[in-house]
Image (cartoon, helix red, strand yellow):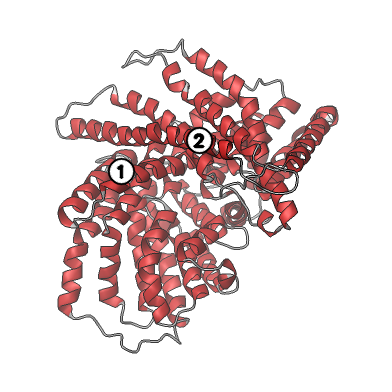
Amino acid sequence: MKVAAASTLDEATPRPWLLRAERWIGIAVSIPAALAVLAEVGILLVGVTSRFVFNHPLVWSDELASTVFLWLAMLGAVLALWKGEHMRLTTLSGRFQPRARAFAETLAVAAPCLFLVFVIGPALDYMDDQSFVETPALGWPDSIRAAAVPTGCGLMLLLCVIRLLQHKVLDIIAVVALLGVIAAGIYFGAGPIVALGNLNLVLFFIVLLGAGVLLGVPIAFSFGLATTAYLLTTTSTPLAVLPGRIDEGMSSLILLAVPLFIILGQLIEMTEMAKAMVAFLASLIGHLRGGLQYVLLGAMLLVSGISGAKTADMAAVAPVLFPEMRKRGLEDGEMVSLLASAGAMAETIPPSLVLIAIGSVTGVSIAALFAGGLLPGVVLAIGLAALARQRAGGENLRGVKRAPLSVVLRTFLIALPALILPVLIRMAVVNGVATATEVSTIGIAYAIVAGIVIYRRFDLRRIFPMLVETASLAGAILFIIGCANCMAWALTQSGFSHGLAAMMAAVPGGSWGFLLISIIAFIVLGSVLEGIPAMVLFGPLLFPIARQVGVHEVHYAMVVILAMGVGLFAPPFGLGYYAACTIGRVDPDAALLRIWPYLGVLVLGLLIVAAVPWISIGFLPQ
């Protein structure tokens, strides 16, 4: 969401020179960010080819990929700020009166500005410290890689200042006054706050953090500000720890799969591989009552096995199916309810980005998560299909005929190269042929070849915008993970994790009680924080408890992912719900009442998955 510009006390009038400056910064960052995405694909593809084809591992490839990745993540975070793509909750602020909404939008710019002011100095010190570290294979000073942190923070700070100057002077004064009052209250109340012990965590990580998120401050910066305030007030820990934590959270090579699966998702949409899969399913079962609803669910299962990103899944499926579903008399609210619930259903389908994030922060095998994620999604899909059939009673099937066998075979042959790709991705990871990161590059190469040779849909003019969009979306996700890593570290240092472990381990009912309270907690967290930041923040704390009470870590991962999915796609707070409405071009109010039966089926399916561990772990190698 772009922040409205303003230049006078009374009305919003754009200042052309500020808008031009903002645009030129965005363009200047877009070029190296796009090149970084392209470089990562090339580095990893060369590394995989050298190792598996020529049996000659390149010892320098991981180091170079790590360096480029941190630059990609930080430049992507700058692009996300420029394009308004940092995740934020606008449900509450969007309902404010215009005057209060303008204030909230100003706060949404000023708060990140404040955090970046705090972190820019320590980031420069961090870069200087890393100059004494030499990379083993390349022999480069690590400051080359670490320089990405202060560069990205500095560019984001510059963008924030430019954007802040476009707001009304009165709003800027009011926001600065509010932040000043909060800072003064925390500063002068430091003694009593410290005396509260761990109860002060409520002030910083529930009250302060919650207020920022609800007022529309981007989630990553809300994490960062709450952590900064906590460290400055209650500890003697220098802020120099923040850049290191951000770097550590963002630069894990496991997370390199995030931008690569994002671009893979865009490639399957551009090459019309997703469209081919949908066409095959429609020819097979589209003539049945509720057939297009079944097609939507089946397509979400298939496409999720390729793109890894739920937004990409919905964007690939909805535009193809919604026009025909409208012709059959389905109401917009019903369609978007099914789309949103299908997005929640597919959260565990590999190669879900949430699965990759869980593996990176908890140490659970990604191959095991990929193997365990398929069947829980199928269980929920069966429940949604039954409900869709029951609610399709008024569907208009006049003129809809069963496709002849020749059409089914033709669409199958066209879709076959696309259908092979999700199988290739899953089997390569589960059988240990390639890591989740490596297999994404194989998928990208496969999609490019299929798009050029088979589908003849490969528009070179779209490549640069795709690379920029990949960098932007990946930067938004990775910067959240970096800031959440700071917050998780602060919570761990406070001893909170031990207290939480003791409390949740003492829940009556043993493992069943722990699973139930986890379901409730992650439905709430998923609706407020979105899936990845919630998992990054709480995964390292809760997975050890799950093992302690006897819950298999893969089973627990499936339960909490599905719980987060329910929260993520549940109105009025779930960000995924509004993404589904935007992609389907449906007013959010149209589905507010219709979505609840679908969410009810999801919760029922979630309880079944929680009660029957075999669904999650039955196919794991013993």
Residue furthest to the top: 132
Q: Residue at x 60, y 63 (%)?
A: 571
Q: Is residue 182 left or right of residue 513?
A: right
Query: Sequence-wise, which precedes: disc 1 or disc 2?
Result: 2
Q: Residue 302 — which label?
A: none
Q: Nearer the viewer, mark 1 or mark 2?
A: 2
Horizontal and vertical percent position of residue 419: 24, 59
Nearer-the-camera pick, 302 or 561: 302
Instruction: Give neighbour class at mark 1: few <14, some 14-19, many 20+ (Cα, 10 Å).
Output: many
Is label 2 in a helix, a strand or a loop? helix
Q: Residue at x 43, y 29 (%)?
A: 70
Is label 1 in a helix, a strand or a loop? helix
Horizontal and vertical percent position of residue 131: 46, 12
Q: Is residue 322 left or right of residue 90?
A: left
Residue at label 2?
Answer: 78
Horizontal and vertical percent position of residue 61: 29, 26
Q: Indicate whether 33 appears above or below 353.
A: above
Is residue 93 visible to the viewer in this orientation of the structure? yes
Nearer-the-camera pick, 416 or 95: 95
User: Quadrant of the rendered structure where residue 201 is?
Assistant: top right
Residue furthest to the bottom: 398
Nearer-the-camera pick, 481 or 149: 149
Residue at label 1?
Answer: 440
Horizontal and vertical percent position of residue 216: 65, 48
Q: Indicate whether 617 appears above or below 125.
A: below
User: Quadrant of the rendered structure where residue 29 is?
Assistant: top left
Q: Amino acid at mark 2?
A: Val
Is residue 362 visible to the viewer in this orientation of the structure? no
Q: Are marks 1 and 2 in contact (CB under 8 Å)?
A: no
Compute the Cα span from label 1 to label 2.
24 Å
Q: Amino acid at mark 1?
A: Ser
